[in-house]
Amino acid sequence: MDVSDRRPLPGLTFPEAYLHRLSDELSLKFSGIFGLETVERYVLESYTSLLRGSTVRAHVAARTVRFATDRLTALAQAKGAIARDVPEVLFVCEQNAGRSQMAAVLTAHLSGGRVHVRSAGSMPSGEIHATVIAAMAEIGLDLGEEFPKPLTDDVVQAADVVVTMGCGDACPVYPGKRYQDWELADPAGQSLEAVRDIRDDIRAHVVTLLTSVGVEPHSLPA
């Protein structure tokens, strides 16, 4: 379908041409898996959900590309249309601005790519806490490109292990998934020293998790 022949997407407050282009690109990427209408719906939902919570609108466009692509990938994995070569772990906290972000980055690094991670929030905030970014930078891990994302059904379906951290009953439960709940202090409003302790607590949990799925943890950057 030519972009010029397509009817406008409903309820759009951002320039439609950009979202239409993104839909076309993702339709090609997921050709044979999803139809154009499904891709358009995911792009629009991803855009509007990020726009709703964003404090810096200039970031929304680039974040929509990543979020919509990851959600469609997760849905394709859940449908069995894309193979899962490594374990999929989803970390969920309330704001997706601290604990779940630290856990995801630590898991990705310590697993050496042998585990694929996602993170989400039951009530995501606009940006990651500055103290969390600073605490992770101290151990050589960069959160500069990460951002809070709302919890969606597709990423839960794609996960092998779902780790919750103070998000209540917001996470849907699916048969065959492995669920863990980690009791961790919330870094929101905490000092850098306190966030360092939370970071180290999360690292210990991550090491145990990796060992349980048969992955030998790597070391942190020197």
Image (cartoon, grey):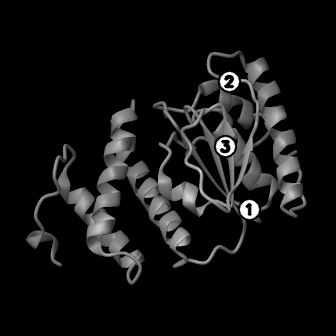
The residue at the point 60 percent across, 57 percent down is: 174
The answer for how far apart the CA atoms under marks 2 and 1 are is 25 Å
Question: Which amino acid type corresponds to the residue marked 3 in the rendered image?
Answer: Asp
Element marked by disc 1: loop
Looking at the figure, which quarter contains the C terminus? Answer: top right
Q: Quadrant of residue 69?
A: bottom left
Question: Against 196, is 32 above or below?
Answer: below
Depth order, front residue of 166/26? 166
Q: Nearer the viewer, mark 2 or mark 3?
A: 2
The answer for how far apart the CA atoms under marks 2 and 3 are is 17 Å
Q: Would residue 220 be visible to someone looking at this image?
A: no
The answer for how far apart the CA atoms under marks 3 and 1 are is 18 Å
Question: Which amino acid type corresponds to the residue marked 2 in the rendered image?
Answer: Pro
Earlier residue among tags 3 and 1:
1
Tell me residue 54's x, y (percent).
39, 34
Q: Nearer the viewer, mark 3 or mark 1?
A: 1
Q: Residue furthest front?
A: 175
* Residue at mark 2: 187
- Within 10 Å of disc 1 (Cα), the crowding (few <14, some 14-19, many 20+) is some
40 displayed left or right of 171: left
- Within 10 Å of disc 3 (Cα), the crowding (few <14, some 14-19, many 20+) is some
Element marked by disc 2: loop
207 displayed left or right of 182: right
Element marked by disc 3: loop
Question: Which amino acid type corresponds to the residue marked 1 in the rendered image?
Answer: Val
* Residue at mark 3: 142
* Residue at mark 1: 115
Question: Against 209, is 122 above or below?
Answer: above
The residue at the point 54 percent across, 56 percent down is: 155
